[in-house]
């Protein structure tokens, strides 16, 4: 292996370099200039995102432990864009709250380490790399969820996240050990003799699936989601709901479609049941939420249920639709969380009731929120409609008509609660509405990118063709 | 390989260990006990990997190597969990689960 082959790990190397640069920068920045760390991080990460789009060759490293394909590169870029938007949106919060306690650089280091773990996870070629990437992506986020050390609910959400994710990774490991017992190898390429008739592989599959279900917050394993989102800082809640979930869905898709493909008749049924349960429970619990963060948490559970509609068919169409949906979901959910964050930072209010009359005082923010919620609900002109439409088409193409019917029924339920928020903002008036305020430059940029994404991504059809072309080789 | 003990006995033991851990995780009332339960779950998988490697595929070392990594990561996980528990303890002077239930439903 010569040095040139390391260029395959370009994303990982660059991100690691950024982390190291930030450590050095922290040492040499005088105490009264700590806010420049934020600018430096955003700038460096912007460069990283741009460089990620350069095309390179694909291949594998370390005897097959690490591999990249065009689709994996593309998905890493999607994650990069998401994190960049998230950094722009949370820059003000970091400058106002975190820098004052002199803990700015740790925030970026932990966030980037977690992203590094996700890179390794989605381009892993064996279960060891997968497990290490998974842990590296979860542990820093747990530390970040407990980041506001003076707040009690922040610690509480941190402990809930770390305990449930530790249980999940324990379950995944037990499942992996079963698969290892069946096939004698932990390399994805060498795992060939899994059969749907052997109980050991089925047990391994079920344990593995439930462990990953924790990360995606599918229904029997979703209990941590709302609590963690409510207690954690908003930028971390949106990171968990968007980036973390997207990466976990992606690796789950790759594993189910390649390594666990022989067990397809088992996991089809499993996904069918879990998809129905996830959509219904996510939607019904979202109806009764008063807090915006909990509301978005349950809405993100329901969205994960919709993704399973693409997962169930297990072919190239499913891959393309899932990646496309996740891309759109990243933009829509980040827009919603961005508005919540802007308002919470300014006023500290997070309840749906506080949003009454928002349109009269802050029309721009309400419009962004409305677009985001329409996109999450799937109303035609915006991108979310096309994401959902393709997912339903994919499921219908394999004959899952009843499942599609249940999905459409759930879209109707979700429309109700998304419109509740829109009604509160636009139709209700309130005496103590949130007064007009001007968001800072970074936040405005972050929201603008999401709005452009929501408006353009659905209509710009070459994008879907491009993703479909990429998903030719998923492994 | 241990003389006179087949793989079935050891796998039964680790499965029992795993489910005892899950049961403990769901029922314990103390955060530290929950951490202990998680350690039991992780150690069940560690033993599983070593045993499967030794009994079924003795010519490769994949399982043993995997178990070393699990032990290291489990230590990191526990350290982080204990750090958060200590931070919580500073605020509420308790490590009981029932005292950490501000957010529900």
Image (cartoon, rainbow, N blue to C red):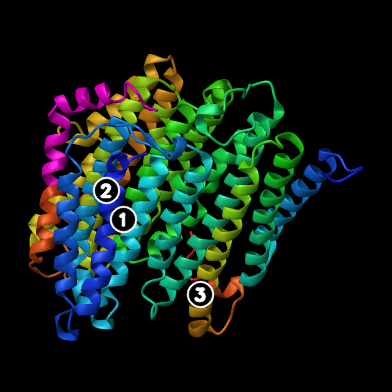
Which x, y percent locates residue A418?
A: 28, 46
Mark 1, secondary structure of its residue: helix
Above or below residue A119? Residue A384 is: above
Q: Chain of mark 3?
A: B
**Label of residue A392 in the image:** none
| Residue picked out by circle 3 | B83
Q: Is residue A283 magenta?
A: no
Say which of A191 and A111 sits in front.
A191
Nearest to viewer (mark 3 / mark 2): 3
Between the residue at mark 1 and the residue at mark 2, the CA separation in whole angstroms equals 8 Å
Secondary structure at numbered mark 2: helix
For disc 2, the marked residue is: A333
Is B40 rendered above or below residue A244?
below
Label of residue A238 in the image? 1
Residue interval drawn in magenta: A451-475
Left of B16 or right of it: where is A370?
Answer: left
**Residue shown at 88%/43% (left/top)?**
B5
């Amino acid at each position: 292996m010569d040095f040139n082959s390391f260029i395959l790990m370009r994303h990982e190397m660059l991100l690691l370099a950024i982390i190291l640069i930030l450590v050095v920068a922290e040492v040499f920045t005088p105490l009264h200039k700590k806010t420049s760390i934020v600018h430096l991080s955003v700038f460096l990460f912007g460069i990283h995102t741009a460089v990620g789009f350069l095309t390179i060759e694909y291949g594998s490293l370390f005897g097959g432990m690490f591999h990249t394909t065009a689709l994996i590169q593309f998905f890493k870029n999607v994650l990069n864009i998401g994190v960049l938007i998230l950094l722009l949106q949370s820059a003000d919060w970091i400058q106002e709250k975190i820098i004052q306690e002199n803990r700015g650089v740790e925030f970026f280091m932990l966030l980037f380490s977690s992203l590094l773990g996700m890179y390794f996870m989605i381009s892993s070629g064996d279960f060891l790399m997968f497990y290490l990437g998974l842990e590296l992506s979860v542990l820093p986020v747990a530390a970040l969820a407990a980041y506001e050390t003076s707040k009690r609910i922040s610690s509480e959400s941190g402990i809930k996240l770390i305990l449930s994710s530790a249980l999940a990774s324990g379950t995944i490991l037990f499942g992996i050990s079963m698969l290892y017992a069946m096939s004698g190898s932990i390399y994805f390429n060498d795992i060939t003799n899994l059969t749907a008739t052997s109980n050991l592989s089925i047990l391994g599959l079920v344990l593995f699936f439930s462990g990953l279900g924790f990360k995606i917050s599918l229904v029997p394993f979703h209990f941590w989601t709302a609590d963690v989102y409510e207690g954690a800082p908003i930028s971390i809640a949106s990171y968990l709901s968007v980036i973390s979930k997207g990466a976990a869905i992606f690796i789950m898709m790759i594993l189910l479609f390649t390594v666990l493909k022989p067990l397809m008749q088992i996991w089809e049924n499993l996904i069918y049941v879990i998809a129905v349960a996830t959509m219904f429970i996510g939607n019904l619990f979202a109806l009764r939420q008063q807090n915006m963060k909990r509301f978005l948490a349950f809405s993100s559970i329901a969205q994960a249920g919709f993704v399973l509609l693409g997962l169930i068919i297990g072919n190239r169409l499913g891959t393309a639709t899932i990646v496309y949906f996740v891309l759109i979901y990243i933009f829509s959910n980040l827009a919603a969380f961005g508005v919540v964050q802007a308002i919470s930072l300014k006023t500290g209010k997070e309840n749906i009731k506080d949003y009454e009359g928002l349109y009269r005082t802050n029309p721009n923010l309400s419009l962004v929120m409305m677009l985001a919620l329409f996109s999450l609900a799937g109303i035609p002109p915006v991108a979310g409609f096309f994401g959902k439409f393709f997912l339903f088409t994919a499921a219908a193409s394999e004959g899952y008509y009843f499942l599609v019917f249940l999905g459409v029924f759930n879209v109707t339920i979700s429309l109700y609660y998304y419109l509740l928020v829109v009604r509160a903002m636009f139709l209700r008036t309130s005496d103590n509405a949130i007064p007009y305020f001007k968001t800072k430059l970074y936040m405005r940029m972050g929201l603008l990118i999401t709005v452009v994404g929501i408006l353009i991504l659905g209509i710009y059809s070459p994008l879907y063709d491009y993703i479909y072309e990429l998903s030719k080789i998923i492994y | 390989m241990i003389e006179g003990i087949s793989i079935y006995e050891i796998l039964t033991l680790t499965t029992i260990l795993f489910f005892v851990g899950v049961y403990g995780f769901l029922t314990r009332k103390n955060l530290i006990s929950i951490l202990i339960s998680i350690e039991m779950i992780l150690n069940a998988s560690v033993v599983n990997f070593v045993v499967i490697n030794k009994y079924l595929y003795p010519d490769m070392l994949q399982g043993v190597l995997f178990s070393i990594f699990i032990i290291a990561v489990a230590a990191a996980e526990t350290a982080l969990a204990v750090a958060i528990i200590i931070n919580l303890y500073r605020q509420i002077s308790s490590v009981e689960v029932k005292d950490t239930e501000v957010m529900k439903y």
